[in-house]
């Protein structure tokens, strides 16, 4: 029975936490059409992991700190490249990947960074679980506290500025929230497919065409199904959970689309 193993117990708790956290952040990214920022920052986290391992510190904390810096850098560069978001992402991606490759190829790392690229249920420790728990609780509380401001900015940033919302400050805070979601998810999902957990459950929920809160709730539900199914199947198939979770996320999205098409066809008759 796999639940008798402590690493699986830790992995299940961590998976449940990130299944709630990722859609809470991802729904705002998708509405703002910033889903590629999640992909850029997930790759940036690899540099944070490498630097954390190089300094002998917790790689999750290293990923969080470096990704937060990259998120703030993206927000800072938006003032200079307002019409070229893809260029900003290229700059940050080049910087972070360059740092990651340089550190990893230096031969000075005393730990294997590959598990962070693909995700692994074997590497989740109680210390990681505690770090992820703290990041998740703080992030969800901030989302709840700033919910209306984040929603306003997501739909119309200029109108939010006119209404007196401190848009720039909240955007920097939101960058840190994205960083926390990414750092929390690395152990299970892995760097290479992390962005799928931020955007795909939201994409599936948006097919239902309900209100924002309902979309958020269904995003969390789909996320839990994706991550838990990926975790349990990866244990029995002996594969990395990240890739399997991404496949399940795409499959669930396609199922929702097909069901929606069938319902639409039936209603027309």
Image (cartoon, helix red, strand yellow):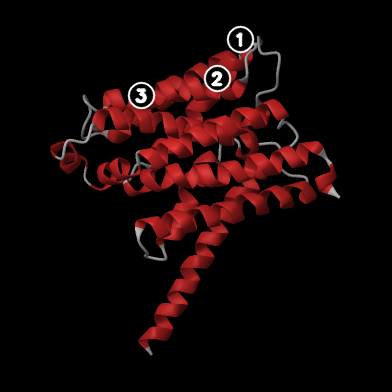
- Of all residues, the one furthest to the left in this rendering is 162
What crowding class fits label 1: few (fewer than 14 Cα within 10 Å), some (14-19), or many (20 or more)? some
Give the residue at mark 2: 62
Q: Nearer the viewer, residue 143 or 255?
A: 143
Question: What numbered label is drawn on residue 72?
Answer: 3
Give the residue at mark 1: 55
On screen, 158 above or below 112? below
Left or right relative to 239: residue 96: left
Question: Are dots 1 and 2 in contact, CB under 8 Å?
Answer: yes
Question: What numbered label is drawn on residue 106?
Answer: none
Labels 2 and 3: the sequence-earlier one: 2
Left or right relative to 124: residue 163: left
Residue 258, percent from left and from top: 49, 71
Taking the spot 52% from the left edge, 26% from the top edge, the residue there is 45
Labels 1 and 2: the sequence-earlier one: 1
Labels 3 and 1: the sequence-earlier one: 1
Taking the spot 28% from the left edge, 23% from the top edge, the residue there is 76
Left or right relative to 63: residue 177: left
């Amino acid at each position: 029975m796999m639940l008798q193993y402590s690493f699986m117990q830790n992995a299940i708790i961590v998976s449940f936490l990130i299944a709630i956290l990722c859609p809470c952040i991802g729904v705002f990214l998708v509405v703002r059409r910033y889903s590629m920022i999640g992909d850029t920052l997930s790759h940036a986290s690899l540099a944070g992991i490498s630097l954390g391992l190089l300094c002998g510190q917790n790689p999750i904390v290293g990923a969080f700190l470096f990704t937060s810096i990259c998120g703030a850098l993206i927000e800072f560069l938006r003032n200079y490249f307002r019409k070229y978001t893809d260029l900003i992402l290229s700059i940050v991606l080049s910087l972070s990947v360059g740092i990651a490759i340089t550190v990893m190829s230096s031969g000075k790392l005393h730990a294997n960074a590959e598990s962070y690229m693909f995700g692994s249920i074997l590497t989740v420790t109680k210390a990681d679980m505690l770090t992820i728990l703290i990041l998740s609780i703080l992030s969800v509380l901030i989302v709840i506290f700033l919910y209306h401001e984040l929603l306003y900015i997501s739909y119309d940033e200029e109108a939010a500025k006119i209404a007196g919302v401190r848009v720039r400050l909240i955007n920097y805070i939101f960058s840190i929230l994205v960083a926390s979601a990414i750092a929390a998810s690395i152990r299970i999902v892995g760097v290479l497919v992390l962005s799928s957990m931020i955007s795909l459950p939201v994409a599936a929920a948006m097919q239902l065409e309900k209100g924002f809160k309902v979309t958020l709730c269904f995003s969390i539900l789909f996320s839990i199904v994706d991550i838990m199914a990926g975790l349990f199947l990866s244990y029995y198939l002996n594969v990395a959970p990240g890739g399997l979770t991404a496949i399940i996320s795409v499959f669930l999205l396609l199922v929702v689309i097909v069901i929606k098409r069938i319902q639409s066809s039936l209603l027309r008759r």
